Amino acid sequence: MSSPSPSPAEPAQAAHPLDPLRPDEIASAAALLRGAHDLGPRVRFVSLSPAEPAKGSGAEARRAAEAVLYDAQERTTIEARVDLDAKTVTDWRVLTGVHPQMTAAEFLSVEAAVRRAPQFLEALRRRGIADASDVDVDPVSAGHNSAPEEQFDSPRRLARILAFQRPNPGGNAYSRPLQGIFGLVDVDTGELVYFEDREPVPLPAEDGEFRADRVGPLRDDVREIRITQPDGPSFTVEGHEVRWQKWRLRVGFTTREGLVLHHVGYEDDGELRPILHRASYAEMVVPYADPDRFYQAPLDIGEFNIGTMTNALELGCDCLGAIHYFDAAYASPDGEPVVVPNAICLHEEDSGLLWKHTDFRTGDVQVRRGRRLVISTIVTVGNYEYGFFWYLHQDGVISSEVKATGIVATQALHDGETPAFGALLAPRLGGINHQHIFCARLDFDLDGVENTVVEVETEAVPQGSENPQGNAWRTVRRPLATELEARREIDPLRARGWLVTNPSRENAVGQPVAYKLIPGDNTVPFAAPGSALRRRAGFVEHHLWVTRYDAAERYPAGEYPYQHPGGDGLPRWVQADRGLEQEDVVVWYTMNHHHVPRPEDWPVMPVARIGFELKPWGFFARNPALDVPPSEPAGGGSCHA
Ligand code: CO
């Protein structure tokens, strides 16, 4: 750039290859794609994200974008790559037989088409609804089931529908589910290809209000809380590179996954030690348990691109304190940049007690309060919100949590009816049993790329000569040598966890340095073996998978899960049964939030949490938080006698 004062569209600072795409880069990539190929009138931009450089290439790698387009006329998917430095399209592949993610434009076009369909209008009339404009139609990804209405001579792009009536303008539509309406829509043509109207169920009476000005008197004893950091936060941000105390990382964003962490490392005694090369939630699925809703099991990341559903966060509301926000941008279906202001929140939180000891003889007290760095984003997927949170702690722990909130999926019930596969939320309103199953992709580079994953669990020693008093127990370790062997389940009764180790680097006590994956709340999928869910979202079969790094293996249910019959992703990749010892390994952790709805989840659900921890396990020589300074007591003086 020759201009001495660059315009905002052309920032002076060169972007790192892993940085999220800027709006000007999205516009430029879209223009280059349009210029290089004659895009038909019905070609839509599905996603546009940074094309991440090959692992091992440095910051000098070229800045590139990868695009997925969909041609609704030809029913083809196009994968393209744009070199943003050279301003050229470097790759263009036309795929048939796959379905890319549903875009917001398709979502709304399905709703509009259904609202015009005569069968649907007749079903509304049967329910005493004269005006379709206050009826919401939520498309549901069709999945791949064996129902007779799904069988067509030639492939179609399909969505199921769920319909709700808003009790008032802006009100909670999920309070009024239109029970008994079943439909299947051709997303490309808007044709209602299958429709069934069973016996209507009267609408529940409650309006499900939760807006502040509608819920009646608000409690008046909540005093203001203020988080102040008079000297500013302890982190620094340069572009998308974050430094916080001894932690280093880069914040990324893709259309498909939303928030991504890159190059998470810790500065230990002057050495920047890599831990995670890349971390993200790479897939999720929400299967429902009612036989009438067999199709409802959306893979929200792989079928809907959660990055495009990212909330713009607000200070004092979503985040509190001294915040640094990162904006994010994605391409609209027309290829226009859509900017989400404040898409990713970076801030510090007090995290309670870090460590403490009182010498009860001398009275000496040593206590440190802990702090954590929070990197978070929130997405809205139809009725639900998901917050994806990553935490870096002063003691070297990395933890992650998904916060589920929003409105549960509902069904209308007859008076006196209790749902067989759910629970009553309110009079004549049921919530359906379901699970939220997340898969975190953790590309470890623990002190280098060559790592070994070791299962560790605890065993009681049988009482006898080795254990005369019966108190003995010990931990046992077993390296997971190959990909098939590394398909593992949690076992809280054996305190099972998994160590990611670097056998070529010894710690202070002569053992391989390690981080331990410690599962949190979890359970198993309850859909039947061989069911559509377990074929299509095969990652749910195991809590742990380990694969040898391959740049093409990014999403655990495959690149294109929409309407995919199943078998793609992790279950397919591990058939190669590659060796995993001292290799570049990727760890995949699957966690099930088991959601049996309860009245307290209505009309809006308090946050439910599920997560895991990555804990240093002989990575450091001693407690890495010894050097955290004591804090000053609120009233002045010293915390330390
Ligand atoms: Co739920």
Image (cartoon, rainbow, N blue to C red):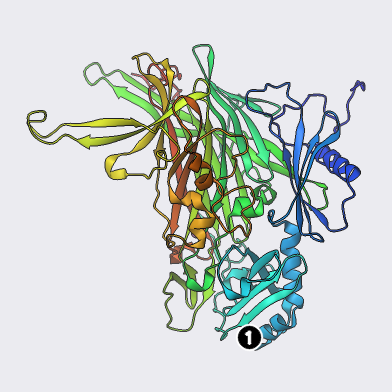
Residue at the image position 62 percent from the left and 70 percent from the top? 173
**Taking 31 as reference, is 592 above or below it?**
below
Outermost top residue: 270
Q: Label 1's element? A: loop
Q: In the rendered view, would you say 533 is above or below 351?
A: below
Q: Picture coordinates of residue 291 (x, y %)?
A: 48, 72
Using the image as rendered, state which of residue 543 and residue 552 is in the foreground.
Answer: 552
Quarter holding the C terminus is top left
In x, y percent, where is residue 183?
Answer: 64, 75
The quadrant in which residue 368 appears is: top left
- Residue 315 in percent (x, y) is at 64, 42
Mark 1 residue type = Arg
Q: Which residue is mark 1?
A: 127
Q: In the rendered image, is residue 162 in sight?
A: no
Q: Quadrant of residue 454?
A: top left
Horizontal relation, residue 75 to residue 54: left or right: right
In the picture, which quadrant includes the N terminus? top right
Residue density around tag 1, few if under 14, some if 14–19, many if 20 or more, within 10 Å: some
Q: In the visual, does 444 lie left or right of 7? A: left
| Residue 69 in view, yes or no | yes
Q: From what the image shows, is residue 393 above or below residue 389?
A: above
Vertically, is 608 above or below 266? Answer: below
Q: Residue at x 64, y 70 (%)?
A: 161
- Determine whether, in the image, residue 556 is placed left or right of residue 505: right
Residue 70 x, y percent position in the rendering: 77, 54
Number of numbered discs overlaid on the protein picture: 1
Q: Nearer the viewer, residue 33 or 566?
A: 566
